[in-house]
Image (tube, grey):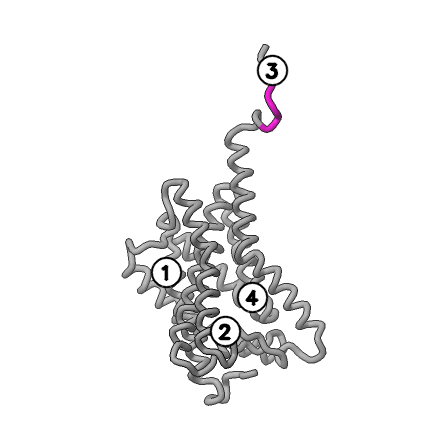
Amino acid sequence: MAQAGPVGDSLPQERLSRRVLRHETLLVLALSLGASGVSALISFIGSVTRPGGLKDQAATLNASAAPGRPWLDLAWQLFGIGTALVPVALVAHLLLREGSGLRALGFDRGRAGFDLLRGAVVAAVIGSTGIAFYLAARGLGFNLTVVPEALPEVWWKYPVLILSAVQNSVLEEVVVVGYLLRRLDGLGWTPRASLAASSVLRGSYHLYQGIGGFVGNMVMGVVFVYLYRRWGRVGPLVVAHSLLDIGAFVGYALLAGKVSWLPTA
């Protein structure tokens, strides 16, 4: 009779693969937006326990990393944008092992026209609703005052804001929608459970903005998961998110202090 091998060797290959995929997913999230969710929660606890209301506090998104030293500041900005995209490169690597790559998530140039058109329409619909929701949430005291940018008036300000917007979009839509749903589907989660996980995760790393930021982005997550399931592509979502963030970052830079309806810190 052959001697029994170690317990680990006797595990069915399917079960082992599910365990590996589960650990892989947790590690990707821990290196990216899962960690951001924990950070945002800690920030939110600090905000609600600080004297004064939430709307009297500010959350700054794109701030100077080296005030008074523009070239060093630019280097830090580009470094931050580049390193933030490393989890996307990791996801691409993991998917390439399956023989697919990011095209499996619909993040390629194969249907660029489709992605641009659908993304622009989604951005137009969500953009106006999002601004109204933010102003209402802040007015009710559920949200901090969001300062989308606080960069110095230098030549690279607007290019960096645009790059930052695109970076946010690629990271979030590739990891939180395309990759996460693919892995949860592979692990046997129901579509409803996967939708809830993706949407709550999206809301969680915006919690530093307050309850309004959490709820608003969670609702946006529900819409984006629905559209991904319908279209099978994250491309339109990246376009929509990029346009939304570019509008927020550049729009704030151009309008802050010049219109009465836009809150400033």
In magenta segment, residue 6: yes
Q: Which of marks 2 and 3 is nearer the N terminus?
A: 3
**Can I make out residue 133 in this image?**
no
**Secondary-structure class at tag 3:** loop
Q: Distance between the residues labelled 4 and 3?
A: 54 Å
**Residue occupied by mark 1:** 236
Mark 1 or mark 3, which is nearer the start of the sequence?
3
| Mark before the other along the chain sequence, 4 or 3 | 3
Structural crowding at the residue carrying mark 2, measured as other residues with C-alpha within 10 Å and reported as few (<14), some (14–19) or many (≥20): some
Q: Does the magenta stretch include residue 200?
A: no
Residue 148 picture location, percent across and down: 50, 76
Residue identified by numbered label 3: 3
Kind of residue sitting beneath label 4: His
Q: Kindly state the secondary structure of the residue where label 4 is placed.
A: loop
In three-dimensional space, the C-alpha distance between marks 2 and 4, rounded to whole angstroms, equals: 14 Å
Q: Which residue in the protein does label 2 denote?
A: 62
